[in-house]
Amino acid sequence: MTFILGLTGSIGMGKSATAAIFRACGVPVHDADATVHRLYAGPAVGAVEATFPGVTVDGAIDRARLGEQVIGNAEAMKRLEAIVHPLVRAAEETFLAEAQQKNAPLVVLDIPLLYETGGEKRCHAVAVVSAPAAVQRKRVLVRPGMSEERFAAILARQMPDVEKRARAHFVIDTGAGFGFARRQVDDIIRALAFTA
């Protein structure tokens, strides 16, 4: 049986870098965000453009334009999720089926809004990536196009970090650097009785 570890964390906590550590350890990772990027470059373009006119640039969804229409607008976000989530879920199911066929002992589902969307029910355990709030804020506000208002709107959609940590089976602290995070990932893989 393939063990499914959910990986999540609020914006700026270091989740993508932590997913890369799992990959470097030989663990297959399904990246929900990367899947959305692929969908926005092809399969989801027609439906998203029809729902949010003017968000397509050069045949692909422009995330900044889309963000202007959906961030901070709960109703718009629900309409977008109704289009995108089933497509992401289908890609995830294909990934899991392939992992089972290859007898992969462990896979990671990298899902930003894991708890918010009930994704933990599809996992055997969950690891939450976390860092001190000051570190998170510094990381996020240096991103291109990020503002205090946008950061606040994104955080408002996410379960508070303290609650995610309380619900997690594992917490990976990235606030002390990624060497420390790597040791924690190694520990998790060992705890699940797999070797990197």
Image (cartoon, rainbow, N blue to C red):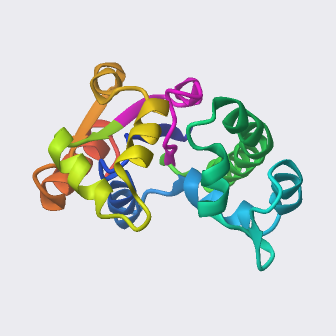
Q: Which residue corresponds to the image point at 33% horizontal and 60% vertical from the top-left? A: 17
**Percent from the top left, x then y, of residue 151?**
39, 46
**Percent from the top left, x then y, of residue 51?**
85, 48
Residue 110 part of the magenta segment: yes
**Percent from the top left, x then y, of residue 65?**
65, 61
* Residue 124 visible in the picture: yes
**Percent from the top left, x then y, of residue 153?**
46, 38
Taking depth in this image into account, of 14 and 110 the one nearest to the observer is: 14
Taking depth in this image into account, of 118 and 124 the one nearest to the observer is: 118
Give the farthest residue toward the bottom: 58
* Residue 196 visible in the picture: no
Q: Which residue corresponds to the image point at 40% horizontal and 45% vertical from the top-left? A: 149
Taking depth in this image into account, of 181 and 24 the one nearest to the observer is: 181
Residue 27 part of the magenta segment: no
The N terminus, quarter of image = top right
Q: Which residue corresponds to the image point at 34% horizontal and 48% vertical from the top-left? A: 148
Is residue 92 depicted above or below 165 in this figure?
below
Taking depth in this image into account, of 14 and 92 the one nearest to the observer is: 14
The C terminus, quarter of image = bottom left
Q: Which residue corresponds to the image point at 29% horizontal and 32% vertical from the top-left? A: 170
Part of the protein shown in magenta: 108-127
Image quarter of residue 133: top left
Image quarter of residue 35: bottom right
Total tally of numbered discs in the picture: 0
Is residue 167 depicted above or below 148 in this figure?
above
